[in-house]
Image (spheres, rainbow, N blue to C red):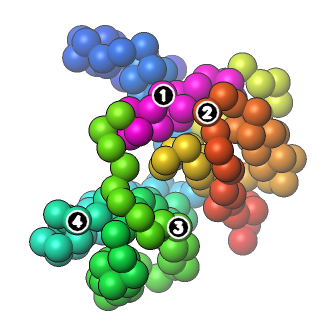
Amino acid sequence: MIRLLSLAAIALLLQGCAGAVMVGAVGGAMMVNDERSFSTQLDDTNADFQIASELAALEDVKNQANITGVVMNGNVLLIGQSPNSMLRDKAIHAVQKLKLGGKIHNQIRIGNPTSFTTRSNDTWITTKVKTRMLNTDDLDVTRIKVITENGEVFLLGVVARDQVDLAVDVARNTAGVRKVIKVFESPGS
């Protein structure tokens, strides 16, 4: 509880918006309630940084595409846009070379990178989905990561089937969501 209050206070001091405060507080609670071991959480965070660094080193990918990676339980979700399959494949190959150990879920769309306005709207959609999840009885939002890319909501986590169904229902019925993609794992798998 002290950790949550500290995170909220820091966010307020940084003069973030209400959505950032809510997301930050939930993020701290996620670490405590996560099904993954603390070691796995650290490995996943490290892998997130490795992917970001590897993609940033690819000048053509960095300058022409909008590709990011998120790691959950050793598995990688690649999202974003690439103007062509050559750059998409180059990014995927760079992540494969990292040998992170899990599956790579390619959700990179071929097309122009999204605009700042679209990315801002995606942030707003993520905030709305997380807020609605917080207000849903019997849904443990602290075990679910929500990422929005061009109106598509990606749900990640290590959660039981009933939680998956609730989370998908909330996301699917949130204004602005075009599609929901599940990247869940069951506990113990």
- In the rendered image, residue 145, in percent from the top left (x then y), is placed at 56, 45
| Closer to the eye: label 1 or 2 | 2
User: Can you say whether 74 is above or below 23 in the image?
Assistant: below
Residue 178 in the image, given as x and y percentages of width and height? 65, 44
| C-alpha gap between disc 3 and disc 4 | 17 Å
Earlier in the chain: of badge 2 and badge 3, it is 3
Mark before the other along the chain sequence, 3 or 1: 3
Mark 3: few/some/many CA within 10 Å (<14, 14-19, 20+) = some
Inspect the image, locate mark 4, and give the three-letter code of the amino acid beneath it.
Gln
Q: Which circle marks residue 64 in the picture?
A: 4
Q: How far, Cα to Cα, is label 2 from label 3?
A: 19 Å
Where's the C terminus, which quadrant? bottom right
Q: Position of residue 42 (x, y in %)?
A: 38, 58
Quote the CA–CA distance across marks 1 and 4.
Answer: 25 Å
Identity, as a three-letter code, of the amino acid under mark 3: Gln
User: Can I make out residue 170 in this image?
Assistant: no
In whole angstroms, how far apart are the C-alphas of marks 1 and 2?
A: 9 Å
The residue that label 1 is drawn on is: 124
Q: Nearer the viewer, mark 2 or mark 3?
A: 2
Q: Number of labelled discs?
A: 4
Residue 189 within the segment the image draws in magenta: no
Identify the magenta region: 118-134
Please state which amino acid type lies under the numbered disc 2. Answer: Gly
Observer-nearest residue: 159 or 120?
120
Question: Alpha-carbon neighbours of circle 4 within 10 Å: few (<14), some, or many (≥20)?
Answer: some
Amino acid under label 1? Answer: Trp
Residue plotted at (73% across, 60% down) = 187
- Residue 182 placement, left or right of 26: right
Q: Look at the numbered discs 3 and 1 and tell me whether their residues touch, using CB distance below 8 Å.
A: no
Residue 125 appears in view: yes
Q: Do labels 1 and 2 touch, CB within 8 Å?
A: yes
